[in-house]
Amino acid sequence: MLLFHLLSICAEGKSTHNGKTIADSFNKHFVSVARDMLATEPEANMPSIHTDSLQYLARTHNQPFPPINIKYVSTKELKKITKTLKIKKSYGYDEISTKVLSSSIYYISSPLTYIINRMLSSGIFLSRLKFA
């Protein structure tokens, strides 16, 4: 179950929310950036064969990565999102229909919010939730 809408981008002159189109657009962009960098200054952008890889990484990435700020899910937000789902008897790989979810959200919203926020804070996601 997707609990939030990540983004939309302008791909090929059209705004899209399609995940595959977004991923393809990012892929094309980063491949072209790498290709352009190598074409303009191939030696400046790549370590030589004789350079130790760890030294190269330490030299080029000497600044720590900025912290990631995660906005946690609230029970109110979870209930609001659940209300927007189309009520159906069919279900996906989780075997929970939106009808069952919608009718039980007031009872399960607190534990479900806790589980979601624990996954976000720890970075560990249940295997069953890793399906697209």
Image: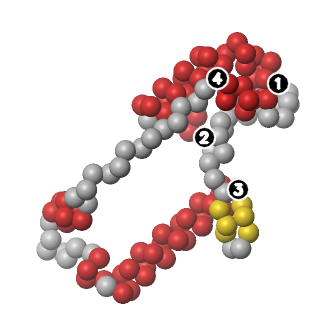
Label disc, if present, on residue 131 of the rendered structure: 2
Residue under the point 13% across and 74% down: 50
- Bin the neighbour count of mark 1 within 10 Å (Cα to Cα): few under 14, some 14-19, many 20 and up: some
SS type, badge 1:
helix
Amino acid residing under circle 2: Phe
Q: Earlier in the sequence, mark 3 or mark 4?
A: 3
Label disc, if present, on residue 99 of the rendered structure: 1
**Of the two numbered discs 3 and 4 in the rendering, the one whose residue sits closer to the viewer:** 4
Mark 1 to mark 3: distance in Å?
25 Å
Mark 2 to mark 4: distance in Å?
24 Å
Q: Are marks 2 and 3 in contact (CB under 8 Å)?
A: no
* Picture layout, residue 71 above or below residue 14: above
* Picture layout, residue 124 above or below residue 41: above
Mark 1 to mark 4: distance in Å?
18 Å
Q: Earlier in the sequence, mark 1 or mark 2?
A: 1
Amino acid residing under circle 4: Thr
Label disc, if present, on residue 17 of the rendered structure: 3
Amino acid residing under circle 3: His
If the image is split into quadrants, where does the C terminus sit?
Answer: top right
**Of the two numbered discs 2 and 3 in the rendering, the one whose residue sits closer to the viewer:** 3
Q: Are marks 1 and 2 in contact (CB under 8 Å)?
A: no
Mark 3 to mark 4: distance in Å?
25 Å
Mark 1 to mark 2: distance in Å?
21 Å
What residue is shown with label 4?
A: 75
SS type, badge 2:
loop
Q: Quadrant of residue 77?
A: top right
**Of the two numbered discs 1 and 3 in the rendering, the one whose residue sits closer to the viewer:** 3
Q: Earlier in the sequence, mark 1 or mark 3?
A: 3
On the question of residue 31 being in view, the answer is yes
Residue situated in front as seen by the camera: 47 or 79: 79
